[in-house]
Image (tube, rainbow, N blue to C red):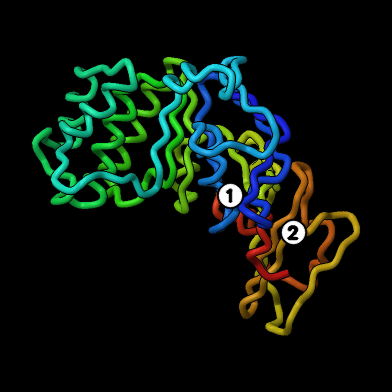
Amino acid sequence: MINVKNLNKSFGKLDVINNMNLELEPGTIFGLVGVNGAGKSTFLKLLSGVLIPEYGVIKIDQQSLDENQDVKKNIFFLSDQPIHSHGMTIKDLRNLYHVFYPFDNAKYLSILSLFNLSENMSLSHISKGMRRQAYIAIAFASNAKYLLLDEVFDGLDPIARLKFKQLMIEENQADKIFILTSHSLRELEDICDSFGIIDEGRFKRFGHLSDELSRLKKYRIILKDILPYQLTTSSLKILFQQQEGRVLTVVIEGEHSSLENTIDAKDYHVIDELPINFEEYFMVYQGGGSK
């Protein structure tokens, strides 16, 4: 279990993490999302012990990071830009991490084979995506219970992404916790069961992904006139509306809310309810749409 209470981190006068709280149970794949500079990478570095908070508590399996350094053996942090020395091979990388973790060499070799990688490949001479695959193999073979993976899909081609997701699903049966960050919200939606949106160093939205998506309804309304149409109603919470010609797109909050009874039938031809995805959810709550 990961338990975070009242976590704060500043760099000089810049507050990056502000009173953040989080509790994750084993078996969770958690998507950590936010705009650039929101604090995602800093939060992962705090969870892994790379950074020390100004105040707040981080407990891993009921043990504090600053009280028990051995707990770090259960945490694997993969940064968005992992550093390696010139000439280092994948095998050299394996030998380095073998010192710090109860390493599973058979799993490591199996995942390398899955990604069509060889131990003798130089990290400096392979693509960014292949380096990411090598680090993924190291992460899974470390046998850490908590994998903190920053921009983990970056550089991976579609086939590698699919293989990685399958690995996560298989490993998640062993009561691990994955915390992933990615700018590809569609990838996170495919694999994550819960999420948190960081904004200005705190969680703006948080919850179970499918439950949160079901709270929103998206409608496409074909209007009878191309004149600008502003839907206003006190009975519905309208989060987003945008018009292009005769097509008005509206997103409302509330599982049992409906537009049919709030818009005059003389104003439109048809109303279609459409599915809403995680990317649209993020844009609505992050303020990235017109209203």
Across and down, in percent, residue 161 comes to 32, 42
Give neighbour class at mark 2: few <14, some 14-19, many 20+ (Cα, 10 Å): some
User: Residue at point 48% right, 36% down?
Assistant: 50
Q: Nearer the viewer, residue 105 or 226?
A: 105
User: Residue at point 64% right, 25% down?
Assistant: 3
- Determine the secondary structure under disc 1: loop
Q: Which residue is mark 2?
A: 239
Single out the residue that lies furthest toward the front. Answer: 12
User: Residue at point 36% right, 34% down?
Assistant: 165
Q: Which residue is mark 1?
A: 39
Viewed as shown, does residue 206 lie left or right of 158? right
Instruction: Indicate which disc, 2 or 1, sits on the residue closer to the N terminus.
Output: 1
Q: Nearer the viewer, residue 195 or 43?
A: 43
User: Residue at point 51% right, 21% down?
Assistant: 27
Q: Looking at the picture, does residue 261 appear above or below residue 182?
A: below
The part of the image, by quadrant, that contains residue 255 is top right
- Determine the secondary structure under disc 2: strand
Across and down, in percent, residue 68 comes to 54, 17
Instruction: Kindly indicate whether the residue at mark 1 contacts the one at mark 2 (C-beta within 8 angstroms).
Output: no
Q: Looking at the picture, does residue 64 appear above or below residue 272?
A: above
Quadrant that contains the N terminus: top right
Single out the residue that lies furthest toward the right. Answer: 234
What mark, if any, has residue 251 been given in the picture?
none
